[in-house]
Amino acid sequence: MSRLTPQSWRVLDCIFRKAGFAFVRQASSHRVYEKDGVLRPLIVPEYDEVGVEIIQGLLKTAGMTRGEYFALLKKC
């Protein structure tokens, strides 16, 4: 399996929207996404490079596997 690498917030926006998350609001430089069935919202910082640790946390919160992430990454 591929290795996680830092991504732009725009790429993460595309990935999570394709995964069914909806952008609901923005608090300063952090974008908030929600999806029915996911208990906690995803908080994506508007960084040019979002670090691997943050991406791993987002995947865990979203209940998304690495395989699903990489499949969506190819589409974005």
Image (tube, rainbow, N blue to C red):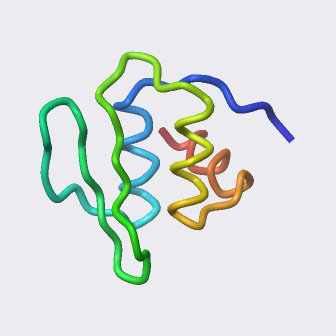
60 shown above or below 53: below
Q: Along the line of sight, which residue is nearer the eye, 49 or 69?
A: 49
Identify the residue at the far top of this view.
Answer: 48
- State the residue at coordinates (33%, 33%): 45
74 shown above or below 23:
above
Q: Residue furthest bottom?
A: 37
Residue 26 placement (x, y as % from top left): 14, 44
Residue 41 percent across, percent down from the top left: 34, 62
Q: Residue furthest right?
A: 1
- Relative depth, front residue between 24 and 57: 57
Number of numbered labels in the structure image: 0
Q: Residue at x 52, y 61 (%)?
A: 61
- Left or right of 41 in this view: 24: left
Residue displayed at 47% across by 26% down: 50
Q: Position of residue 49 (x, y in %)?
A: 46, 18
Where's the N terminus, which quadrant?
top right
For residue 13, which quarter of the picture? top left
- Taking 15 as reference, is 19 above or below it? below
In the rendered image, residue 62, in percent from the top left (x then y), is placed at: 51, 63
Residue depicted at 35% across the width and 41% down the height: 44
Q: Is residue 35 left or right of residue 62?
A: left
